[in-house]
Amino acid sequence: MAQKSTSTAYVSGHQESVLRSHSWRTAANSAGYLLDSLLPHMQILDVGCGPGTITADLAVLVPNGHVTGLDSTSGVLDQARATANERNIKNIEFVEGDILKLDYPDDSFDVVHAHQVVQHVPDHVGALREMRRVCRPGGLVACRELDFSTMTFYPEDHGLGEWKELWLRVARAHGSEPDAGRRLKAWAHEAGFDWSTITTTTGSWCYSTREERAWWSGLWADRTVASSFAKNAVDGEHATEADLARIRQAWLTWGAQEDAWYGDVHGQILCRV
């Protein structure tokens, strides 16, 4: 049915170090701005569903409806299907496809949702335009994207500052826009939504307990040296392996400090079709 994507610019890849964070995401902690708009009968398309944890939650919230999770990577869809099977969720399916060439007729879904996806597509406006196309009149296009430059650490650390600048360079070299959150409203208007149909909010993640710091710093330490980001950084001559090893240690050092705190801001849009 759906076609494999060649349109995404996902700089991180889908290694275990990456999916460790993606699998933590739930509808409550990552799509809360959408949940009050859901009705039991709705048909939902979750674009860029990854390991399917948000997708599965959405399916539970529309028991008389149906949810389709779509991703460009077949391997991660196997994990998504396993997640749904473990939870015995029946009103759900997962397909491989391309956000810029959705293989569905116009007006197919009541809600089209994407979480941390549009930033990784070189044609950000085109992605939202395609999401709008397959959404029914009266339906909702929902999108949440991190604004990467808002990522804030205490205590401030030179190594983490170096990592942040490196991430911005590598991501943009691959067609991504890490500061997508602040641009969502403008992109939605370019995609054809009238200003009056766009509702904007912000969300955030914060990690400060010992357990949260260990998890967050550990996964980013691993992502720095054991993900597609590491290969892209070295192959693109943005950093050396020694640079990445130093940044990895900075993450671990930060996470071990009792006074350490992390916060960020995400842009969120609900667009009425």
Image: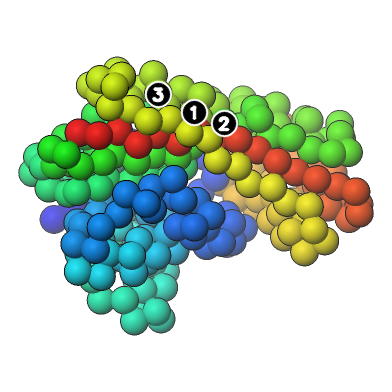
Eyeballing the image, is 63 above or below 43? below
Q: Residue at 13%, 55% (x, y): give it.
A: 1
Image height of 236 relative to 76, above or below: above
The residue under label 1 is 180
Residue wearing tag 2: 147
Secondary structure at badge 3 equals helix
Residue toward you, 140 or 238:
140
Ranked by sequence position, the earlier of labels 2 and 1 is: 2
Label 2 to label 1: alpha-carbon separation:
6 Å
Residue 113, x across and y down, in percent: 33, 46
Image x and y of residue 139, in percent: 20, 42
Residue drawn at point x = 54 percent, y = 45 percent? 12
Q: Of callouts 3 and 2, which one flags the residue occurring earlier in the amino acid sequence?
A: 2
Which residue is rendered at x = 32% and y = 49% of the image? 37
Calculate the distance from the C-alpha at mark 3 to the C-alpha at mark 2: 13 Å
The percent coordinates of residue 162 (x first, y second) are 78, 30
Residue 211 appears left or right of 175:
right
Residue 192 appears left or right of 187: left
Total numbered circles: 3
Q: Kindly check if marks 2 and 1 are in contact, taking CB atoms under 8 A apart as contact.
A: yes
The answer to whether residue 119 is seen in the rendering is no
3D distance between C-alphas at marks 1 and 3: 10 Å
Categorize mark 1 by other alpha carbons within 10 Å: few (<14), some (14-19), many (20+).
many
**Lateral position of residue 204 relative to residue 80, left or right:** right
